[in-house]
Image: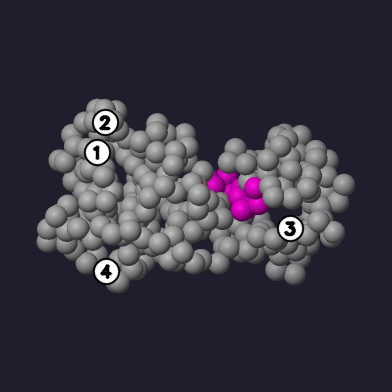
Amino acid sequence: MKDLKNRVIGLITDFGSKGLHYVATMKAVILKINPNVQIIDINHYITPFNIYEARFLISTTYKYFPQGSVFIIVVDPGVGSSRDILAIKLVSDYYFIGPNNGIFTNAFKSNDISECIKIQNDKYFIKPVSNTFHGRDIMAPIGAYITKNVELKNFGPFFDLKDFASYPIEYKVSLKEKQIKGIIQYIDQFGNGITNIPIEANKVEGSSLNLEDGDLIQFRFNDKEYKGIFTSFFSSQPPKTLLFIKGSTNYLEISINQGNAAKQIGFKVGDTLIFNVKE
């Protein structure tokens, strides 16, 4: 039995600065059910309805939390519709609550998931349930009850992982042409474009393609070609120059040293890019 005083809930929403009262209401619901839980704000400034950003934050933040942590993700353009709300437990003992709208697609490997249920048992809901705020009335209380050691099976029936909502994710590696096709999945405060191209020990994950310091990478966007050097740290290249780097989340990033790559180049989250690597 987990210690109720050491449980953590992480919140991810697209509510923004004008919706922080919604966040506060969710926290109030949680604390009413379990006043001993710790709540961490991961991000409330996701671009409205942006599935790519939500999935990126889910997959890159949870492993730094204590085991047993619960993550509630309210990025939900289909709120009030027939879309399902899921509760997921990983083999590594992390829990996730959110809509089945693509945010969980490829966020984890299928063998990482030990249990997934469709939340239906309104015994645990805040009533009356609003058609426009399931984050408050369904997701927040379910998350709180999980921190009180209520098992997922109490919340609803088994959900088949094959029924995860699909969402377009471009990713392909061509070894022969040393070409990588990927998307921009997140843009940070500095304008760095974080792709979905995973890098492990300078190797493109799932392939034998290596990226070494000094390699030239080029890509085309809006009929214009861009070139930069793959490097280990920003200041290895002159200020205002384009570079590519393995970021802290282990994805390939498009950056400009002391500049804003997203503004200068004009890419946005969801854009597909084809990268060519030259040693």
Q: Earlier in the sequence, mark 3 or mark 1?
A: 1
* Tag 2: amino acid: Met
Label 3: element kind:
strand
The residue identified by callout 4 is 80
Picture quadrant of residue 103: bottom left
What separation in Å lies between label 2 and label 1 (alpha carbons)? 7 Å
Q: Are marks 4 and 3 in contact (CB under 8 Å)?
A: no
175 drawn magenta: no
Residue at (50% x, 49% y) in the render:
111
Q: Quadrant of the N terminus?
A: top left
What separation in Å lies between label 2 and label 3 (alpha carbons)? 45 Å
Q: Are marks 1 and 4 in contact (CB under 8 Å)?
A: no
Please state which of the two labelled residues, at mark 4 or mark 3, is closer to the viewer.
3
Q: Earlier in the sequence, mark 2 or mark 1?
A: 2
The residue identified by callout 3 is 173
Residue at (32% x, 39% y) in the render:
9
Q: Are marks 2 and 1 in contact (CB under 8 Å)?
A: yes
Q: Which residues are magenta?
A: 188-198
What crowding class fits label 1: few (fewer than 14 Cα within 10 Å), some (14-19), or many (20 or more)?
A: some
Would residue 214 be found to the left or right of residue 74 on screen? right
Please state which of the two labelled residues, at mark 3 or mark 1, is closer to the viewer.
1
Please state which of the two labelled residues, at mark 1 or mark 4, is closer to the viewer.
1
